[in-house]
Image (tube, rainbow, N blue to C red):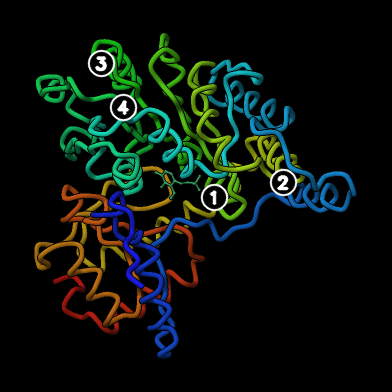
Amino acid sequence: MNIQTAKRLNGIGEYYFSQKLREIDSLNKAGKAIINLGIGSPDLPPHPDVIRVLQEESAKPNVHAYQSYKGSPILRGAMSGWYKTWYGVELDPETEILPLIGSKEGIMHICMTYLNEGDEVLIPNPGYPTYSSAVKLAGGVAVPYEMVESLNWEPDLEAIAASDLSKVKLMWVNYPHMPTGQQPSADFFKRLIAFAQQHNILVCHDNPYSFILNDKPMSLLSVPGAKEVVIELNSLSKSQNMAGWRVGMMAGARERIDEVIRFKSNMDSGMFLPLQLAAAKALTLGKDWYDSVNAVYAKRRELVFELLDLLNCQYNRGQVGMFVWAKISPAYADGYALSDEVLYHANVFITPGGIFGSAGNGFIRVSLCSPEEKLQQAMERIRASLPVAVNS
Ligand SMILES: Cc1ncc(COP(=O)(O)O)c(C=O)c1O
């Protein structure tokens, strides 16, 4: 039989981490016991009250049916309350919030909802690889905008405005930025909204990292006039340690929510009610929760800085989020070369910055989702096996 995949898959590879995890798995089977400092999947558990709600609710007999396409009113209410408490943004829980099965699916839903064949979408370079794959899968054309450290990893809006934007319909932005850990400035957010209004572009802001090692969570929706031109995605994966639960949300004007529901309601059939109720609980956790999680990440980050010193990398200590982004030593051709050297000689995996786009080639990214003992062990291995890298 000659089975051909659809043309839309041309140029779409398997997701980098899905491929790399397979390689790490086979190295592990060969006895290497790789320390994986790659992916940003929190290793800490959710708050015990959240687990309790899931246990209690799932033991009930009447919670197992299909759920509403737009989510339980309790969850939508909690999401709206969370936006008000932490971002100072008012969202009508009835019409301006849509629970998602993780924010990653929201990226695809938005692209499928708005893009026609050939429509252009501005995407960050470096940036989360899913933006470009989702754009391509939906038939759009990803137009990367390159960002540099000297401009605080912000898009050069003037340069973008000077290019032909006639086919651009959407723009993806993500602050705190993954992978660079750059925080947004209020001034940049204002300029971004003005740019979107001027060029009639729908800005899709992906905001999953605003609580990690960051005292000032910011929503793009807090800028006056933003609701006209912005959709924001958010997630419980990182801030509530619930990555495997798959709970995220989309926030925006009623019209945008209705438009995306037209697509999404054809894709899934709602989320398990006990999970939604437990997620609602997670969104009511107070500052103590975020402080306790961040205290752990802060200690780990100091160790990651040390590890990066061993590899002669340079980094900004003021970055936020769940990773540390670092410029590699000129002794290596690029981040892939350094990542391979560390993987094959020290049995430690760190992410090459190039997977986030060409502007990330000279960088690596280290995740904070490993306990301190693992980070210490990774450093011991690096010291033992890469003596050339150490303070050369
Ligand atoms: C920038 C960015 N956006 C979205 C996601 C997806 O998060 P979720 O677990 O909510 O689908 C990730 C996950 O790594 C991410 O780094």
Q: Amino acid at mark 1?
A: Ala
Q: CA distance from mark 3 to mark 4?
A: 12 Å
| Vertical comparison of 156 with 31: above or below | above
Q: CA distance from mark 2 to mark 4?
A: 31 Å
| Residue 195 tag number | 3
| On-image quarter of the C terminus | bottom left
Q: Earlier in the sequence, mark 4 or mark 1?
A: 4
| Vertical comparison of 75 with 391: above or below | above
Q: Earlier in the sequence, mark 1 or mark 2?
A: 2
Q: CA distance from mark 1 to mark 2?
A: 32 Å
| Vertical comparison of 225 with 129: above or below | above
Image spot of residue 199 (x, y percent): 24, 14
| Residue 153 tag number | none
Residue 291 visible from this viewpoint: no
- 3 or 4: mark nearer the eye: 4
Q: Amino acid at mark 4?
A: Leu
Q: Which residue does the numbered mark 2 point to in the structure image? A: 272
Q: Which residue does the numbered mark 4 point to in the structure image? A: 170
Q: Residue at x 48, y 21 (%)?
A: 256
| In front of the other: 139 or 193 | 139
> 10 Å neighbourhood of mark 1: few (<14), some, or many (≥20)?
few
Q: CA distance from mark 2 to mark 3?
A: 39 Å
| Residue 295 tag number | 1
Q: CA distance from mark 4 to mark 1?
A: 37 Å
Numbered label tally: 4
- 1 or 3: mark nearer the eye: 3
Q: Residue at x 34, y 21 (%)?
A: 202
